[in-house]
Amino acid sequence: MSAIESTLVENRVFPPSDATVKAARISGMAAYEALCQEAERDFEGFWARLARGNVQWTKPFTKTLDESDAPFYKWFSDGELNASANCLDRHMGTAVENKTAIIFESDDGKVTQVTYKELLARVGQFANALKAQGIAKGDRVVIYMPMTVEGVIAMQACARIGATHSVVFGGFSAKSLQERIIDAGAVAVVTANYQMRGGKELGLKSIVDEALALGGCETIRSVIVYQRTATACNMVAGRDKTFDEVLAGQSSECKPEPVNAEHPLFILYTSGSTGKPKGVQHSTGGYLLWAKLTMDWTFDIKPQDLFWCTADIGWITGHTYVAYGPLAAGATQLMFEGIPTFPHAGRFWQMIEKHQVSVFYTAPTAIRSLIKAAETDEKVHPKNWNLSSLRILGTVGEPINPEAWMWYHRNVGGERCPIVDTFWQTETGGHVITPLPGATPTIPGSCTLPLPGIMAAIVDEAGHDIPNGSGGMLVIKRPWPSMIRTIWNDPDRFRKSYFPEEMGGKLYLAGDGAVRDAKTGYFRITGRIDDVLNVSGHRMGTMEIESALVGKTDLVAEAAVVGRPDDLTGEAICAFVVLKRPRPTGEEAKKIANELRNWVAHEIGPIAKPKDIRFGDNLPKTRSGKIMRRLLRSIAKGEKVTQDTSTLENPAILDQLSETN
Ligand code: 6R9
């Protein structure tokens, strides 16, 4: 049985313990249902109440939701606030002021700490440095940084002066970085000389240099370089400055710039169905509300908690649950620079014990790889560490298979910790369908129920409701505060991708397939329904990889990319390639496949490397010339092709493409 199939028949139920329910902020299902009913009864009043209670406004809003230009919804649109003030200044003069904001553990295990007061001063000083570089409200700043406190400081400093940040994950290539710089029209790049991962020092600034040398980035006026390691890097006179240089002489006091609630806090690029990544634009007010609210609702965060989200700040999870949410909630969080398997695959468990982590949030792919490691080496099994500080576990990024869920529950959570399987997307800004730890009985593999006020449903292609028990497309029927506002530079694509006319133009289309259980009404996500792959929780567009492959013009004539299930990474990338030379076999095929893998890593980043590359004289096409992707998906899975191939131009090609290299 495949992982997805086994998810569909799962029926073990794990209710939270009485003690957990009693201590929780949303205590029991009746409390959850009361919030849902409040939202149903008075949708705008509900959100207005929460936005007033959870966000500090410099100018209070009077209008909650503006639907006049739907689907370009506006929330709290006459209100003003500053996101950084809501994460830092709001805690001054309270018990949180001298509390540790971030405990940082470096790749090599060094621990440093920063209090809220210190973080405010460092953010203020860096914000002043940005201003001194001529960066102002409304400018875009690209942040290409490793997991460091300085990365969070850079994001918060942008927010403080009203500059819109666009963080690019440190694993992306020069070309990906260049494309994002150009699309965002960024005026500056904040980066580091190197990043440390798994004991290796990897160049970051060199990739920025390469990106800028590719051309088209004339908007960039300055590159600000954090010296993460002592090793020197190339510095371009007039353009490049170190952190120390820009910080020198700057005051640590910087008045936060009030911005409109709809002011773009950030743009984060993510993969869609077509070639070009989409710049998902988020607001300030609605986004910040969500970051704070979901820390309270989903993680039930308490003053004494130690929160650890393992996501990189280059992904949405690292935005909402590292850079903004924990700070807005006044929590102490652990931040980790390295990788889960260095120096050994027990690193996460060791860190949980060492720092007494109480709320732990990671990805199914990490869990699966640590299960595998623990099965082969007893010494890295979680049982070797005392994990009794844990009280809540979370997962995000992809469906979690029940086997991994059960292992997490038993071996990490000691059968005591609720698991919140949080479904959400770059576009949703934060959790939308998730259990609440002190209310929702959990079922392995199910993200359970929508948060109060999230009108999630399952519909058919015309947008009509589908009865529980049958699969369909996941939609959200009403807007919510932290939703994507538009695609940067491409409002048309925003409308077409997320509010398709065929479905009436009013439903937010998530792009995932889902089923609601006939009995419980619980949601299970069955995976993407578009041409987006999810490899180790990272979103990759098949077209993006295809265009990288055909970009190797001396070698590749045609390429088609599909996903296939993978026990470890959830999905694996499988590429079918037609070369501009005779079809290679044996050693030659292996060699060329490797060459192409490295090429894709160079074009997009190592995460986009196809696991499997197969060569054919041609691709299976219909007589009208369409590539039959469904067939390719079966071949990639190693299935016998049972589909009707009578419309196929060249059926003999299927045997060729079944051969692996
Ligand atoms: C937060 C994040 C979004 C896609 C989403 C879906 C998958 C995320 C999930 C999940 C099943 C969960 N996804 N969480 N699938 N259960 N709990 O991951 O954002 O990188 O934009 O990816 O990830 O397919 O559509 P993003």
Image (spheres, helix red, strand yellow):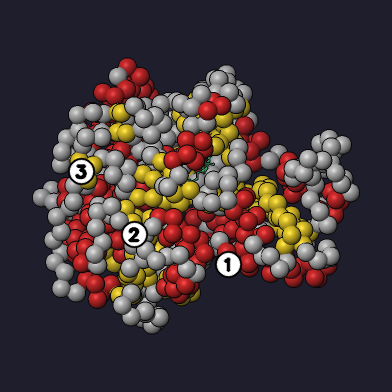
Quadrant containing the C terminus is bottom right
Give amino acid for label 2: Val
x and y percentages locating residue 354 in the rendered image: 36, 61
- Residue 57 in sight in this render: yes
Give the SS element for disc 1.
Answer: helix
Give the SS element for disc 3.
Answer: strand
- Mark 3, residue position: 81
Q: In terms of image quadrants, where is residue 229? A: bottom left
Q: CA distance from mark 3 to mark 2?
A: 20 Å
In the displayed structure image, the side of residue 610 where residue 251 appears, left or right: left
Q: Residues within 10 Å of mark 3 (few under 14, many from 20)?
A: many
Which residue is pictured at 44% across the width and 73% down the height?
209
In the displayed structure image, the side of residue 42 where residue 180 appears, left or right: right
Give amino acid for label 3: Leu
Specify which label sits upstream in the sequence, 1 or 2.
2
Q: CA distance from mark 3 to mark 1?
A: 41 Å
Which residue is pictured at 25% across the width and 48% down the height?
83
The dot on residue 141 is 2
Q: CA distance from mark 1 to mark 2?
A: 23 Å
Q: Residues within 10 Å of mark 2 (few under 14, many from 20)?
A: many
Whether pointer 3 and pointer 1 mark residues with C-beta atoms closer than 8 Å, the reply is no
Q: Nearer the viewer, mark 1 or mark 2?
A: 2
Specify which label sits upstream in the sequence, 3 or 2.
3
Q: Nearer the viewer, residue 237 or 314?
A: 237
- Residue 12 in sight in this render: no
The dot on residue 602 is 1
Question: Compared to 87, does 338 lie above or below?
Answer: below
